[in-house]
Amino acid sequence: MIKVRDVPTEELKEILEKKCGIPASRSCLMVKVMEELQIYRSQGNLFSGKDSTITVRDLLKWAGRVNANSQLGTHMDQQAIALEGFLVLGERSREPKDKSFIRQTIERIFRTPVEIEAFYE
């Protein structure tokens, strides 16, 4: 098994920008969400570790979805990117408390509501 240490924040932003084609302003917000969710998890559940709420892989998946939409000609605004982030991160959470925290974190950092109910209607 290969163990990879944490990717520095600046490098992670650069990866999102260059590999996934995410604008710098959006990659900063996405990385900020990751940092806050890691802090939340490390404080909330000592045995889960900081990566159980979000991993670098999750962040790349989120960025990949945003990039795929833009390549299809669909411009994603701030709200659509926030919703996509919640779909990747929040919808897999089994704990309502964690799901709520993920949603609130994304809404606060992206400064837009995540309208998940409207998405499913």
Image (cartoon, rainbow, N blue to C red):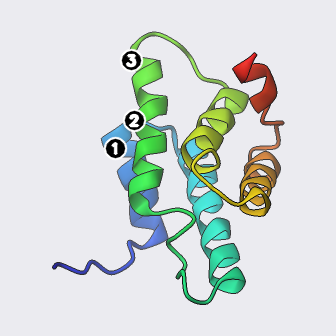
Between 72 and 120, the one nearer to me in the picture:
120
Q: Say whether disc 2 or disc 3 marks the residue closer to the N-terminus.
A: 2
User: Label 1: how many residues lie within 10 Å, few (<14), some (14-19) or many (20+)?
Assistant: few
Q: Are marks 3 and 1 in contact (CB under 8 Å)?
A: no
- Residue topped by disc 1: 18
Name which residue lies at 76% across and 52% down.
109
Q: Secondary structure at mark 1?
A: helix
Residue type pointed to by label 2: Gly
- Against 94, residue 51 (above or below) is below
Coordinates of residue 59 in the picture (x, y in percent)? 47, 52
Q: Secondary structure at mark 3?
A: helix
Q: Secondary structure at mark 2?
A: loop
Going by the picture, which residue comes out furthest to the bottom? Answer: 46
Going by the picture, which residue comes out furthest to the top? Answer: 73
Q: From the image, state whether disc 3 or disc 1 is nearer to you.
A: 3
User: Label 2: how many residues lie within 10 Å, few (<14), some (14-19) or many (20+)?
Assistant: some
Q: Are marks 2 and 3 in contact (CB under 8 Å)?
A: yes
Compared across the picture, whether 46 is left or right of 20 comes to right
Residue type pointed to by label 3: Gln
Between 45 and 81, the one nearer to me in the picture:
45
Cα distance in 3D space between marks 1 and 2? 5 Å
Q: Say whether disc 3 or disc 1 marks the residue closer to the N-terminus.
A: 1
Coordinates of residue 21 in the picture (x, y in percent)? 39, 35
Q: Are marks 1 and 2 in contact (CB under 8 Å)?
A: yes
Residue type pointed to by label 1: Lys
- Image quadrant holding the N terminus, namely bottom left
User: Label 3: how many residues lie within 10 Å, few (<14), some (14-19) or many (20+)?
Assistant: few
Label number found at residue 71: 3
- Residue topped by disc 2: 21
Coordinates of residue 25 in the picture (x, y in percent)? 60, 44
Name which residue lies at 49% across and 42% down.
62
